[in-house]
Amino acid sequence: MKGPILLVEDSHLNSRLWELVLSRNDYLVLSYDDGQKVITDIEDGLQYKLALVDLELPNRGGDEVIKVSKEYNPQIPIYCVSGYLFKPPLATGHIWRGDLNSERLLGIINSHLK
């Protein structure tokens, strides 16, 4: 198993799709759908090698998740995933949902986790 990859996405459909793509490519996925829960776990020492974070999350937003992740794990690449075309502060990059497919997602992940 490769990874783990932190996936923070409140849409069940998107989360399941990404988990399926990643697990079929031998990645361990740590899935969260709540900003506060993942922030608590990061502060408690959650280990991961790359993060995919949606900006719109319940309880605490993705921007807060990114900030805490960078504070506790500054070397970890973080990709913000959203339907909006902009790059949020502190993120390694941005993945626009309208341009997302499994090959592009795997290409991004593989470029960081060789």
Image (spheres, grey):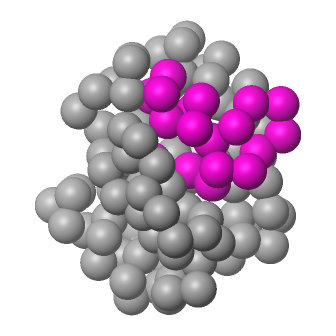
Q: Position of residue 101 (x, y in %)?
A: 50, 88
Left or right of residue 54: residue 14: right
- Does 35 appear above or below 26? above
- Does 9 appear above or below 63? below
Q: Residue 63: name its quadrant.
A: top right
Left or right of residue 38: residue 109: left
Question: Could you tell me how many numbered marks the image carries?
Answer: 0
Q: Residue 105: name its quadrant.
A: bottom left
Residue reaching furthest to the top: 44
Q: Residue 41: name its quadrant.
A: top right
| Residue that appears at 41% across and 41% down | 89
Left or right of residue 56: residue 20: left
| Residue that appears at 32% across and 65% down | 109
Q: Say whether residue 27 is visible.
A: no
Q: Position of residue 15 (x, y in %)?
A: 70, 64
| Residue that appears at 72% across and 71% down | 14
Q: Position of residue 80 (x, y in %)?
A: 49, 55
| Residue that appears at 52% across and 71% down | 85
- Does 37 appear above or below 56? above
Instruction: Specify the segment rendered in magenta.
Output: 51-69
